[in-house]
Every structure is written in C-alpha cells, then in structure tokens.
Amino acid sequence: MTSITISDLLTILFVLVDDWYQSYGPKTPKSKPGVKPVFKDSEVMTLMLAQDYIPYPSETQYLGFIRANYLALFPNLLDQSQYNRRSRALRGWVEQFRRHCLVTKGWHLHSQFLLDTKPVPVMGYKRHKRHSDFAGSAGYGRCVARKLRYFGYKLVAVATLSGIPIVYDLVPANTDERAAAETILDYFSFCDFFGDKGFLGLAWQTKVFDQTNNLVWTPCRSNQHRQNDRRLDRWLNSTRERIEGVFHEVQNTGRNLERLLAKTVEGLCTRIAAKMTSHLLRRILLVDFGINVQTFELLPAFSA
C-alpha cells in the first residue's frame, strides 16, 4: 500500500482550507491600517488542524517539528506566542469551516444520532484553582464509567451513526448530563437520539419531545417500573457499543481530550474546535482522497 508524506498531507489541507477561506473568509478592507500579516490566516488554520494528525501533544514540540522539517512550506512561520494569539482569533472561522464541510457533505441531514458526554479535565483535582483562568467557569465532576473525579468540563456531543460529530458544547463538569444535552438538542427536530443511562428519565424525555419533537432512546435499568421491549433493549445495547466506539475515537485519536494542555478557557475552546474539525476532516480525507491519517497510507484505489 502506498504511503503519503506529511508534506503532501499539509499541502492538501492547505488547499482545502485556503480555497474555503478565499470564498467565505472575512473580507478585509484594503484601507485597514497596520502591517499586513505575512503568515496567512489559512496557514494558521492548516497548522491548527494538522496538529491532530502529527503526534506532538505540546504546541512547543509541534511547532519545533514543523520549523525543523517543513519550513519550506511555511517560510514565515510564527513564534509560539504569535501562533497562539492568531489561533485564538481564528477559532470562530475554524468552526465555520467545520460547519461548511458538514453542509457540503449533507451529514447534518441525518435523522438518527448518537448522544454522549466526555470528561475534559483542565487541572489536577487537588491543585489550588482560585487564581486559575478556569475558576468560575469549570467545576468538579465525576465520570462513573471510569471512576474518575476531575476538575474541568464536560464535552457533550451529537454524532451521526457513522461517527461524524455534528454539534458539540462545553459545559462545567458538575452539570447534569440531561441539562447539558438540552443546549444542543434544540438544534434538531423530529430526530432520534441514542444515549446511555445518563439520559434516563421519562419526565425529561417527554419534556424534550414536547419542546423539540425529538425522541431520546436509552436502555432501562433493571429496577425500573417501565421497561423497554427486550428486542429494543438488545438493539440499544448494541448501539451503546457503537456510541462508546465513536466517542472513544474522538477522544483518543490525535490529541487526547484529557490532555489538551490549555492554560485558559479561550485556549481550551480553540483546541477543542480544532480537534472536532480535524476529526471531521479525517473522514473527508479518507473518502475523497483515500488518505488514512492514522497510518499515512493511501488506499489502493487512489494510488494509481
């Protein structure tokens, strides 16, 4: 099987991003004062998205790797401080690019989705947090499935059955999963959502249906008075395995959600936006270009 180089991958990513940015990006007035940046916004966005495919969790290591090996592609590469400032400023455009890809591929038109939450720790559980940038917005939470206590946020996300993230939100870790889900279920109507037992509750599910016409399906606990049909429960349990697989892939491929190493809320949101967009681009690169970014292999049908 033919392999693809990092240089080729960076070039393909830049073309995808720059073509979109030229068509849909901000229209800067020619008379805008100040020095025009020599490092393009589309170059910054390319590096933001590529970091999830190159195994360097630290931005210092990642930018050092790019500087040492691919400076010919990015001759005006910024230092880390400038790169961080530009990345944060472009977070909204990264999200707009992700939404454009969703609409172009029609993935947002599905009617069945997976619903789940993932922990996003930002600091040590016992570390003093009063002077942290996360104080006041993050919270103490617990992930029962992993027996994990942490300080940070929950990432609540909706994905297609094939694993494409559609909508996501970041809420304090002490937010109830059902309350967290309400913030994104409002984006949908007349859809089916499959989740785990964290989204149980007939009253809450009825409320969601009354407000959005969406149905939330979960397996029942053995001690509940109201039980699902056994065949439905078997199907929901099999769907649950798919949910775990999809969100495990989102969390653990590329930069791990639990080790994003952000020091500010804005920095954390920027890295999550880049990660969710990179995850969507994995599928586009595989389907449209035959590129498996996990192995850097080119599928045979595309290597001729």
Image (tube, grey):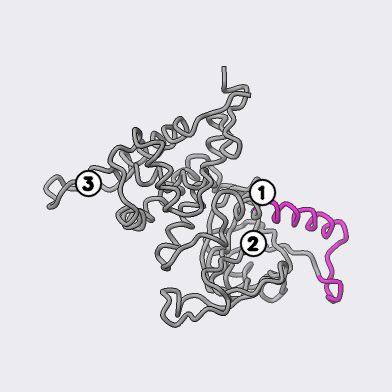
Magenta region, residue range = 221-246
- Residue extending farthest top: 304
Nearest the eye: 67 or 210: 67
State the image coordinates of residue 266 (x, y, percent, origin top left): 40, 65
Q: Quadrant of the C terminus?
A: top right
Q: Which residue is mark 3?
A: 37
Q: Main secondary structure of the magenta part?
A: helix
Q: Which residue is mark 1?
A: 161
- Given residues 126 and 110, the one toward you in this image is 126
| Numbered mark located on residue 116 in the image | 2
Mark 3–mark 2 CB contact (< 8 Å): no
- Considering the image in quadrants, where does the N terminus appear? top right
Please give left or right for residue 238 compared with residue 7 in the image.
right
- How many angstroms separate mark 1 from mark 3 (CA)? 42 Å
- Amino acid type at circle 3 is Pro
Tag 2: amino acid: Asp
Q: Is residue 276 above or below residue 180?
A: above
Badges 1 and 3: C-beta atoms under 8 Å apart? no
Q: Which of pointers 1 and 2 indicates the residue nearer the eye?
A: 2
Alpha carbon separation for disc pair 3 and 2: 40 Å
Residue drawn at the location 64% of the way across and 62% of the way down = 116
Secondary structure found at label 3: loop
Q: What is the x, y in percent for residue 241?
A: 75, 54
> Nearer the observer, disc 1 or disc 3?
3
Sequence-wise first label, 1 or 2: 2
Mark 1 or mark 3, earlier in chain: 3
Instruction: Tell me the quarter of the picture where residue 214 sits.
Output: bottom right
| Secondary structure type for disc 1 | loop
Q: Residues within 10 Å of mark 3 (few under 14, many from 20)?
A: few
Q: Dot 2 lies on which element?
A: strand
Residue type at numbered disc 1 = Leu
At 58% across and 76% down in the image, what residue appears? Answer: 125
